[in-house]
Amino acid sequence: MVDQLLANSDLIAHGMEWTTKEGFVYPNEFIYWSIQIVLYPYMTGLVAGAFVLSSLYHVFGQEDLKDMARFSLVFSLACLPVAMMPLLMHLQQPFRGMEVLFTPHFTSAISAFGIIFTTYSIIVLSEIWFVYRVYFVEQINALKGKKDLVSSFMRTLYIILALGAYDLSNEAVAIDKKAVKILAGIGIPVACFLHGYAGFIFGSVKANALWMSPLMPVIFIMSAVVSGIALCMLTYIIIMEWKKFTTTLAKGRGDESVQLIKGAEVDVIHKTSRYLIGFLIAAITLELLDQIFRGYTAMKSWDILRSVMYGKDFVNIFILQYLFGNLVPFIMLLIPKASIKRTSVALALILFGVFMMRWNVVIGGQAFSLSFDGFMHYSMPIIPHSMETFKEGLFGALLVGATPFILFWLLNKVIPSLHFTKK
Amino acid sequence: MSCSRRDFLKKGLVGGAVAASLPLSSFKFLTPAEAKSAVGDPAVRWGFLVDTYKCTGCGFCVKACKKENDVPYDLPITRTWVERYVITKDDETHVDSPNGDRDGFKDTKIDGKTIDPKDISKAFFVPKLCNQCDNPACVQVCPVGASYQTQDGVVLVDRKWCIGCGYCIMACPYGVRFFHPVYKVADKCTFCYHRISKGMKTACVDACPFGARQIGDLKNPDDPVTKAILTERVAVLKDEYGTKPQVFYIGLDENVR
Ligand code: SF4
Ligand code: SF4
């Protein structure tokens, strides 16, 4: 049986299909970690960033983030399962993925994933429960007596979700608030850990000259927060624009409610972008520090790193990541009187920049051979012709990218996160 | 079989009582790696010796290994390979290893370039395989303990437990690991553990007509391999990574990658 399989002429070594080699590369070297592993830190970054954004309001009482906080909390929940998805999709034995939880081997950075991820999920879920408990109870009361199928289903759902805690007294609500604050407080370090450790997975690989750096976890955290905030803002803008559009259709352009939505939107976005700029500066500073340090210390690997960074990957690193992903949006946000349109473009660019950073770390780290004498080039499979080229290709990536939005849409049916407060 | 709730509770209670009456020390948690490393004889430490002066690049070892260890013959992946080095007088290093040297070096062109023999200052072959490191980076990073080190020093992969994450492949500084396309798990040289633990030599050692490859027990001072390592000038590959490789090379050139 195995003999037959071995003799099968269609056999393909993992990585062969998307790797091109140049110069002297060891025979077993291929791009083993491809697009899904690019998405993994990108997605966890979004989760962590969205959560940190919501916590800024709950813990530090940044009133200006009030409307954003609830939204980004729910968004963070929607992204949560997606942080795991790329990892599972990339495994050669996805059905054994659970082993990471059952038999963790603690000298491995990946083994901590189960623990950190579970802790973090519990925190997010309980925080959401405390935030929405009052809403659950209100809904239970409001839906009482309605006979149609949807209402009774929703009511049952809310009864289950409320977990028997129906108390709406001032004291009870105050306790809820306090719990949220505590959870958000614990959540910040855990979220940073969740993502910092994704950086550690790479930073601790001593065999890889590009990855190995103690700064890696911190760089990952900063860029995570940047991408999380940017995605929350962008999604928020899109949703508010849609609301504005539908309200305009229904009530006419001059209607008061349209103005209200618009005012709220500009206000929230304006305030949030200040935090975004702060984290962006931190992220860029750290990355530059890392680059300068490598160039200055010029270890043995520097020759090959330099030829990757300033040669093969120049466009990816300096043009796409630093110029279009960092510098341009940074300037766009700094110029005063940012319009919604301009901000949206800047946000999209920032998201793209962080994605390119992940790409340049994961793919760039495999762009040169361990022999320091050859290069590997990754061409992402576009049209899949096998499970492998689907999973590790464009469509697998799109699937992962689309899932949080689908989940967010579903979640909003149960826990609406887009109320905006009247001025 | 039916099991009522009452039955279940009863059994649970009994089980709990039995468990509680045992001393705590009988519940030692073994890490997966610990559980598996009970394999092997602690009185032995397998090591390997490559004499680069004797290697002619014939590739018999590569062929033998692929056949012995079920590595798909026509795919570029391989558990062992031989590199050809040509260093020219202008201090340029030219390296290649077409097909891992499965079929020998048939072309005098190296990496597509023709080199005038007059320009060559030195040329040699270097066989490569897993170094069965004493401090294996691959074992350290495996999240589920599927990569483990036996007591006699060989690093193995548990094909029933590996989740195929590829972290070990990334962590090995020598690029000896790959995914096995049939088993879909990480794979690499095992020093032919199934042979050496039965008193045989590895397939590559047996196949080498020139005696360039030898395997031996480094804990036995009378073993020829141990003797050679103790008395001759040997070196290991990339010791800067701190992995403590246990494949020793006689005549290792500084240009070897
Ligand atoms: S050579 Fe690589 S695969 Fe072999 S033991 Fe050392 S680190 Fe592990
Ligand atoms: S690929 Fe297998 S052996 Fe290698 S680190 Fe992952 S689980 Fe361990």
Image (spheres, coloured by chain):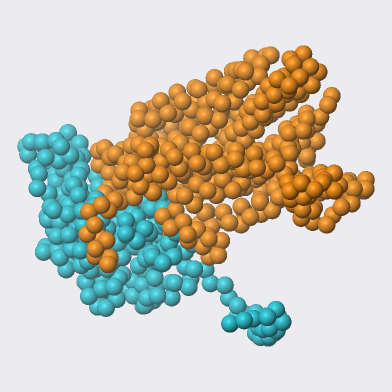
Chain colours: A orange, B cyan
Q: Is residue A373 above or below residue B233?
A: above
Residue B187 in the image, given as x and y percentages of width and height: 34, 59
Q: In the picture, which quadrant includes the N terminus of chain A? A: bottom left
Apparent side of residue A342 relative to residue A132 in the rendered image (left or right): left
Count of number-bearing discs? 0
Q: What residue lies at 77% left-to-right and 13% top-to-bottom?
A: A254
Q: Is residue B131 visible?
A: no
Q: Relative to the observer, which residue lies in front, A35 or A10?
A: A10
Apparent side of residue B171 relative to residue B23 in the rendered image (left or right): left
Q: What residue lies at 44% left-to-right and 29% top-to-bottom?
A: A317
Q: Is residue B246 above or below residue A214?
A: below
- Residue B15 in which image quadrant: bottom right
Q: Relative to the observer, which residue lies in front, B28 or B222?
A: B28
Residue B91 in the image, given as x and y percentages of width and height: 19, 36
Q: Relative to the observer, which residue lies in front, A106 or A7?
A: A7
Q: What residue lies at 73% left-to-right and 34% top-to-bottom?
A: A418
Q: What residue lies at 68% left-to-right and 21% top-to-bottom?
A: A245
Q: Outermost residue toward the front?
A: A147
Q: Is residue A367 above or below residue A258?
A: below
Residue B153 in the image, given as x and y percentages of width and height: 36, 69
Q: Relative to the observer, which residue lies in front, B170 or B209?
A: B170
Q: Is residue A345 visible?
A: yes
- Residue B70 in which image quadrant: bottom left
- Residue A295 in which image quadrant: top left
Q: In the picture, which quadrant includes the C terminus of chain A? A: top right
Residue A398 in the image, given as x and y percentages of width and height: 48, 38
Q: Outermost residue toward the right?
A: A170
